[in-house]
Image (cartoon, rainbow, N blue to C red):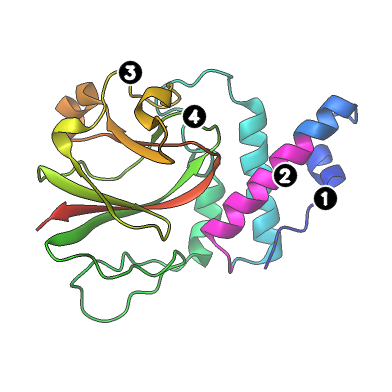
Amino acid sequence: MAVTLDVAALRNALRLGDTAEETAEVTRLLAYATEAVTRYAPDAPDTIHDEAAIRVAGYLADQPNAGRRDAFANALRSSGAAAILVPYRAHGLGVAGATGTAASSTPATPAAPAGLRQTGIETVIVATADRWVGTALPYPATAIFGVQVDAQAIALGLTANLPDAGVSAGADATAALGTNLFSLGSDRAIMADTGGAIYFAASAAGTYTVRLFEHA
């Protein structure tokens, strides 16, 4: 299953012209949308992948240059693409300690180190490097927590050390990232009202599987 759109088809769907600048932009959007929708639901039919890619590309093409908290943080969800892909996506968190085998379209969860239990998993799409992206991951309830990105090793951290200054969707995450590939932060103002707001940032754009662990 794959996205079968070409640049010309996507250009027509987005009602764009054929100038060099517009062609370059459509080419970039098609590459990103293809990666996003096929990773989110790899078994969806081609026609569904195509429609989802059009929605993601159109959403990104029309969004403002500056982020507005969570309003433009997740193109897959906000564009409506996720909704049409969900029926073709295998669900299951694969929580450590659960009985049976949970089907999932994300990579299999490796066994967590002793003392850690998985509490959340989310596919996070980073459209722009070094920028915070809002997630639905639960704020850690324990002082020690772990985070795993894709198949990398679980990194441990302290909730007291989660960066929070200026953390909001679209805000600059350069200081928190430093030389790291990924970073987690929190908006404490939102936490007071909703019980937790976790943000993710990466040094490279892409689609990431983020797992959150708490100390048992």
Is 160 part of what is drawn in magenta? no
Amino acid on which the number 2 mark rests in the picture: Leu
Is 29 part of what is drawn in magenta? yes
Query: Which of the two labelled residues, at mark 3 and mark 4, occupies the earlier sequence position?
Result: 4
Tell me the distance, in whole angstroms, between the alpha carbons under discs 4 and 1.
25 Å
Query: Which of the two labelled residues, at mark 1 and mark 3, occupies the earlier sequence position?
Result: 1
Tell me the distance, in whole angstroms, between the alpha carbons under discs 4 and 2.
18 Å
Question: In the picture, which quadrant includes the C terminus?
Answer: bottom left
Residue 61 — which label? none
Tell me the distance, in whole angstroms, between the alpha carbons under discs 1 and 3.
39 Å
Q: Could one spot residue 14 in this view of the protein?
A: no
Tell me the distance, in whole angstroms, between the alpha carbons under discs 3 and 2.
31 Å
Does 147 appear above or below 57? below
Per the image, label 1 sits on a secondary structure element best described as loop
Q: Nearer the viewer, mark 3 or mark 4?
A: 3
Q: In the rendered image, which residue does mark 1 sit on?
A: 6
Query: Which of the two labelled residues, at mark 3 and mark 2, occupies the earlier sequence position?
Result: 2
Question: Badges 4 and 2: C-beta atoms under 8 Å apart?
Answer: no
Q: What type of secondary structure mainly makes up the magenta span?
A: helix
Amino acid on which the number 4 mark rests in the picture: Phe
The residues colored magenta run 26-43
The answer to which of 108 and 160 lies nearer the viewer is 160
Query: Which of the two labelled residues, at mark 4 and mark 2, occupies the earlier sequence position?
Result: 2
Q: In the rendered image, which residue does mark 2 sit on?
A: 30
Label 1 crowd bin: few (<14), some (14–19), many (20+), radius 10 Å: few
Query: Which of the two labelled residues, at mark 4 and mark 1, occupies the earlier sequence position?
Result: 1
Amino acid on which the number 3 mark rests in the picture: Gly
The answer to which of 114 and 69 lies nearer the viewer is 114
Q: Nearer the viewer, mark 3 or mark 2?
A: 3
Amino acid on which the number 1 mark rests in the picture: Asp
Within the image, what quadrant is residue 135 found in? top left
Residue 72 — which label? 4
